[in-house]
Image (cartoon, rainbow, N blue to C red):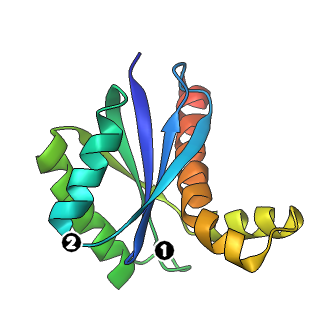
Amino acid sequence: MMRYIGLDVGDRTIGVAVSDPLNYTAQGITTVRRKSLEKDLENLHEIFDSYEIQEIIVGLPKNMNGTIGPQAEKAMEFGAVLEREFGLTVVFWDERLTTMAATRAMLEADMSRKKRKGLVDKIAATYILQGYLDKLSSTK
């Protein structure tokens, strides 16, 4: 079964989520600590090799007014690298509210700050991928 992978790309970490085999739900699987581009790609290869990936969904952190800022440009550059490296289509997904939604969900779950810090990227990746999967299922 082909799956989708969702990435929340930050300067220090990359949150990773994967769709279930039927592509209905997204599950956060890990957070990659960024070291160098080479090492990041190596880590992603290890993760991607565990699944049959059909498309990579990368969160695009647009500014609230919809414009592309420096963080979104970094995400787009990283997406281009992923496309070359893995030979897969990279889809950018507007993630303006995902980190806030992820943080809010963890606050509601009454998680400690330390625990939240370790999970926010993985949960944000889950929100990014889930948003994309929901759009897919609504257009089928």
Query: Which dot marks residue 66?
Result: 1
Instruction: Look at the image and tell me whether residue 68 can be seen.
Output: no
- Location of the N terminus by quadrant is top left
Residue 55, horizontal then vertical, whole percent = 33, 36
User: Residue at coordinates 21% horizontally, 62% vertically from top-left?
Assistant: 39
- Residue at 69% of width from left, 63% of height from top? 102
Label 1 or label 2, whichever lies nearer to me, is 2
Residue 48, position as x, y percentages in the image: 32, 38
Give the residue number, with chain letter if any, for mark 2: 36
Vertical position of residue 111 compared to residue 67: above or below: above
Q: Tag 2 or tag 1, which sits nearer the N-term?
A: 2
Q: Nearer the viewer, residue 23 or 45?
A: 45
- Label 1 element class: loop
Label 2 neighbour load within 10 Å: few <14, some 14-19, many 20+: few
Q: Is residue 116 left or right of residue 107?
A: left
Q: Quadrant of residue 116?
A: bottom right
Asked whether 65 or 86 is in front, the reply is 86
**Residue type at tag 2:** Ser
